[in-house]
Amino acid sequence: MNFDLNEDQLAFRDAARAFAEKSMAPHAAKWDDEHIFPVDVLKEAGEMGFMGIYTPEAYGGMGLSRLDTSVIVEELAAACPSTAAFITIHNMATWMVASFASDDLKQEIVPKLASGEWLASYCLTEPGAGSDAASLRTKAVRDGDSYVITGSKMFISGAGSTDVLVLMARTGDADSGSRGISAFVVPADADGISYGKNEEKMGWHSQPTRMVSLENVRIPASNRIGAEGEGFAIAMKGLDGGRLNIATCSLGGAQAALLRARNYLHERAQFGKPLAAFQALQFKIADMATNLVAARQMVRLGACKLDNRDPEATLHCAMAKRFATDACFDVVNEALQLHGGYGYIREYPLERYLRDLRVHQILEGTNEIMRLIVARRILEDGVAEAIQ
């Protein structure tokens, strides 16, 4: 068992760090302050391969593992968690199309998504279907060689500024549950689509979040991803990786906060000595570092389980998402506290990291839902033994 990164992973890390430091970090505060969606930087990320990290090479992606992906995303998130999070959502949607769409649909759109020429939004959540995603009501009715879609989606990242919607809709009866849901690729500018206001959020200001309304939106039947009734399973497979991705964004923000806190403890002096000399603060930063490393190892373990198609990969992804997003938010909060009043002002990035990381405990399945997923599996015979 070797926990060290290999030479390729170190190279990916260095490339991602250089890109983040050059193209993201200098602008992140402005993007946050002015609510700028940095499409030009996303296209630049596409040129680096970061918009199709685990999309197969045959369709223009890098074809990397989920562990490789985590190494890259952590570096991007250290510069701007909000923008890195959108990149991961786009990667998830792109992978879903590349993995489950027809060959013709893959060839038509995946290379454009993997290159960053087109951007994608993931559309599952609805006004009345959040944690209970299987109760969604958006309807897709077959009409000859088309589907006609009517309904609405809520809290959609990138909505109004993306090119493609990877959307889940009900093709079965109203009481068909998860088995009646199918997945589709919908052009974001199709007739009948309208977008709500850009939501005023606590964080994630560098990406828009809007409601999407669909009124008799007609798309070719060939735009369905997978068979009818497979959409919910496809969406959940996407979310296994999505949960690792968002946990990794928390790792990046927490790592940046930890480094700033360490430097500040050496630079700031009170009562005639540097803050780093006070044992109470030494204990605090020791706990921060310990929890961050534990979170990183859980995320990387989950990534390895997903790469190896372990039967308990979903369980590991849920545990990693719950632990890492909670622990890393606490790391950032403690880093802010160590900075005192300086941590609370916008001249320093810690309050931005705090605002951005808070939503990671909510999206891609709330941490309460992660606990349900974990508990249900652990209570099954043999599972606790299998993950030992």
Image: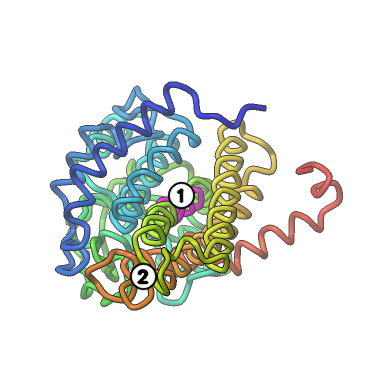
> Where residue 145 sits: x, y (%)?
31, 45
Q: Are marks 2 and 1 in contact (CB under 8 Å)?
A: no
Asked whether, in this view, residue 109 is left or right of residue 273, the answer is left
Q: In terms of image quadrants, where is residue 44?
A: top left
> Where residue 113 sits: x, y (%)?
26, 39
Residue at 36% of width from left, 43% of height from top? 75
Residue at 48% of width from left, 59% of height from top? 364
Q: Residue 248 shows which numbered tag?
A: 1
> Where residue 341 sits: x, y (%)?
33, 78
Q: Secondary structure at mark 1?
A: helix
Q: Which residue is mark 2?
A: 355
Q: Secondary structure at mark 2?
A: helix
User: Is residue 14 visible from the viewing direction of this image?
Assistant: yes
Q: In terms of image quadrants, where is residue 125?
A: bottom left
- Mark 1 Cα-neighbour bin, 10 Å: few <14, some 14–19, many ≥20: many
Marks 2 and 1 sit apart, C-alpha to C-alpha, by 16 Å
- Residue type highlighted by circle 2: Arg
- Residue type highlighted by circle 1: Thr
